[in-house]
Every structure is written in C-alpha cells, then in structure tokens.
Amino acid sequence: MKRKGFTIIEVVLVLAIAGLIFLMVFIALPALQRSQRNTQREDDLARFATAVNDYKTNNKGKLPFHMDGAARYFDDKFVPRYIDENCTLAAGSKAYFLKYENCGSQFTDPDGTIYGIGYHQDMTSSAYANGMIVLQPTFEEAEHKIRAYDQAYCDDEGVVRRATGMRQFALVMILEGGAVRCNDND
C-alpha cells in the first residue's frame, strides 16, 4: 500500500530553494531602492543645472554664485525664484552654504531632506590638486548639499576641473554609495 505525501528530503529541498529566493530578494531590494533614489538625485542635479542656465539667461550671463571681493556669494533668491517658490532661507545659512526650509517637493531629496547649496570657488585649496577634486566626503557628510563651482567644468570621468570661461560652472553631488555626479553647462 502506497502512502501519499512528501518525503522529508522533498520538503527540505523546497524550503532550501524558497530560502535562496528570499535571500536573493532580500539582498537585491536595498540596492534597487538605492539606485532609484540616486537616479532621482541625478535628475534633480540636471534640473538644478537647467535652473542655473535659466538664471544666466535672465541676468545677462551672470551666475547665481560668484566671488564678491574676497567673499563667496550665492544669490539667496535663486532657489525660490527658479526651483521651488515655497522655499525660504533657513536660519544659520551663510553666503557660501545656503540651507532652505518649507520647500515643497521640488528641492527635496528622495529621503525627504531639503537640499543645501554650497559655493566653492577656490579649487587650489588643500582639498584639490591641479583643479581636480581629490577628497570626497561620504554621502552622510555631504549633508545633501549641491556643490557649485564657477569657472569649472566636468571632465569625461565626472571630475571638476578649472575652466577658462567666466560663465562656465559645474555642479557636484555625492550619491549614496559614495559615487559622485558632476553636471556642467557644456
């Protein structure tokens, strides 16, 4: 007389296969989510570059960031006028690092943090060698900051280099995982 049912080997085999599938999904899902967030950040950086170009068009070629004598300067009305009208300048903002608050979805990182803007003019400081970014902060240390450089461009490897044109600019963002995204007006 034959009994119907599964043997212990069949049950263990099915559980092992199900466990492997679960493990693969468990490992792949965070990487997929990180990739989607980074794609959104890259899109935001490209939109930001477009806004800088729009600003230049409306302001006789002037960039929203530049040196004013010995001081770094960023036009604090740039973000509310060109990116998100809901944004207001946060307390503690400085001319070279602007933080915003009360922004809608236009100037906000995928994790909900509002972007900041840092202006970096001195490409010959200790953090740079021959106009090339050498030291990079981690994603957490970057504080969701878009770094703006004037008289700069991105080379083929996405590294900021010094440019000769006064109207050239480069924008840099540190992505999750430590990758660097560079966007310029070339």
Image (tube, helix red, strand yellow):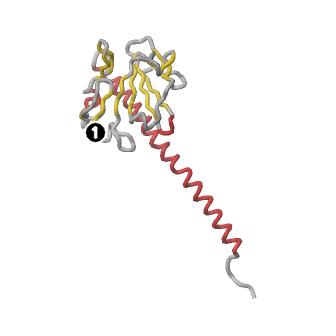
The one of 45 and 70 positioned closer to us in this rendering: 70
Estimate the x, y position of residue 105 in percent, counting from the top left.
Answer: 32, 41
**Residue 51 relative to residue 89: left or right:** right
Residue reaching furthest bottom? 1
Residue reaching furthest right? 1
**Residue 1 relative to residue 154: left or right:** right
Estimate the x, y position of residue 101 in percent, counting from the top left.
Answer: 27, 38
Residue at position x 25%, y 34% from top? 90
Q: Which residue is mark 1?
A: 103
Report the amino acid beneath label 1: Cys
Q: How many marks?
A: 1
The one of 56 and 174 positioned closer to us in this rendering: 174
Tell me the quarter of the image containing the N terminus: bottom right
Q: Residues within 10 Å of mark 1 (few under 14, many from 20)?
A: many
Estimate the x, y position of residue 3 in percent, counting from the top left.
Answer: 71, 84
> In the displayed structure, would residue 141 be above or below residue 72?
below
Residue at position x 56%, y 55% from top? 25
> In the displayed structure, would residue 64 be above or below residue 142?
above
Residue at position x 32%, y 20% from top? 65
Where on the picture, by quarter, is residue 123? top left
Tell me the quarter of the image containing the C terminus: top left
